[in-house]
Image (cartoon, rainbow, N blue to C red):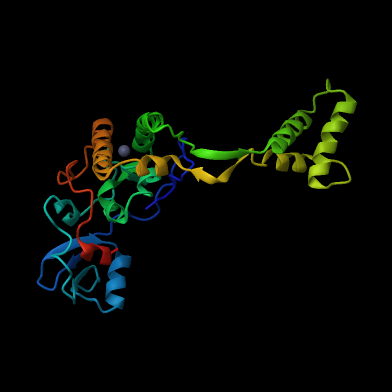
Amino acid sequence: MSSSEESTSAHNVPMPSRQSPLYENCSVYSPRGALMFRCSRKKVEWYLHRKLAISLNEARTVIQLTFEPKGNGRVGEGEEYYLEDRENICVGCGGQVRLTAHHIVPFQYRKFMPLEIKSHASHDIVLLCNRCHDAYENKALGVKKQYAKKYDIPLEGRGYIPHPQHRRLHAAAKALLLKDHEIPAWRLEELESQIREFFGIDGSVDDEVLKQALELPLLSRSDDFEEHGQVVVRRMSESELEEFIRMWRRHFLEHVKPQFLSEMWRVEDPVRNRDAAYLWSR
Ligand SMILES: [Zn+2]
């Protein structure tokens, strides 16, 4: 799963494409022989290594648990989606190249949600090709802006401390890099001395130093900094949170119009994981 959608991503950051398939479609059966859920090879090896399961095929892609899980395993009503094989294609257009794992409920919100919701995440992570992804992200940004307004919390968060000194150094470095002959010599010397003083240099100021000056942050986060997603999620009641998740699912369907999404995937599917046994399998 990609977590490239980091807290500060108020802007559209292109996501790196996946090198490995998202779905490995290994099968986990209960001791009674019921198919419980699909998972990765890594997870299968985790069970086998701890002798919590035995392998049912040579390829070690089908296993059976050796313990009776709490509850009746993964699948409850509305959760059939988890039992299907998944294809490594874009759910939007069926494309097979430049695929990224897309969070239907943006990661910047989901990461602040309770574990019982987060542990349900695979329902709301699907594969999209870069084209479908980028087109959709623009639409998603519009929704995020609405929430920014509704909860009065900007997308970039709140609680930054400005660094006026860095700002002055930026201005000085930019002017010096321009090598504008119209700037009088005394002024250039003044700008250079600001840079020299900050970096503790005696000699001449070269372009490398000026570029370093341009990398100085203009803002940093204070101790009370709050992320956009953190505030939005905190201010929602349990039922508002559920509706929020369903809203994102509907929005995704409406705008991506996925042609290759499982028919088992439904907006109304549960958003919470009520089955402790599944937590075992993470
Ligand atoms: Zn696509």
Quadrant (top left, top right, bottom left, bottom right) of the C terminus: bottom left
| Ligand 1 falls in quadrant | top left
Q: Position of residue 208 (x, y in %)?
A: 75, 43
Q: Confirm whether residue 171 shows in the render.
A: yes
Compared across the picture, whether 145 is left or right of 282 comes to right
- Is residue 252 placed above or below 53 in the rendered structure? above
Compared across the picture, whether 112 is left or right of 181 comes to left
Residue visible at 72% across and 40% down? 213
- Residue found at the very far bottom of the displayed protein: 51
Residue visible at 24% across and 39% down? 243
Q: How many numbered callouts?
A: 0
- Is residue 155 placed above or below 30 in the rendered structure? above
Image quadrant of residue 165?
top right
Q: Position of residue 53 (x, y in %)?
A: 22, 75
Q: Confirm whether residue 281 shows in the render.
A: no
Image quadrant of residue 144?
top left
- Residue found at the very far top of the displayed protein: 182
Compared across the picture, whether 242 is left or right of 182 comes to left
Residue visible at 15% across and 58% down? 75
Please state which of residues 160 and 195 is positioned toward the viewer in this rendering. 160
Please state which of residues 250 and 14 is positioned toward the viewer in this rendering. 250
- Is residue 243 placed above or below 270 in the rendered structure? above
Residue visible at 14% across and 53% down? 80
Image quadrant of residue 205?
top right
Q: Position of residue 62 (x, y in %)?
A: 20, 68
Compared across the picture, whether 252 is left or right of 222 comes to left
Q: Position of residue 118 (x, y in %)?
A: 31, 53
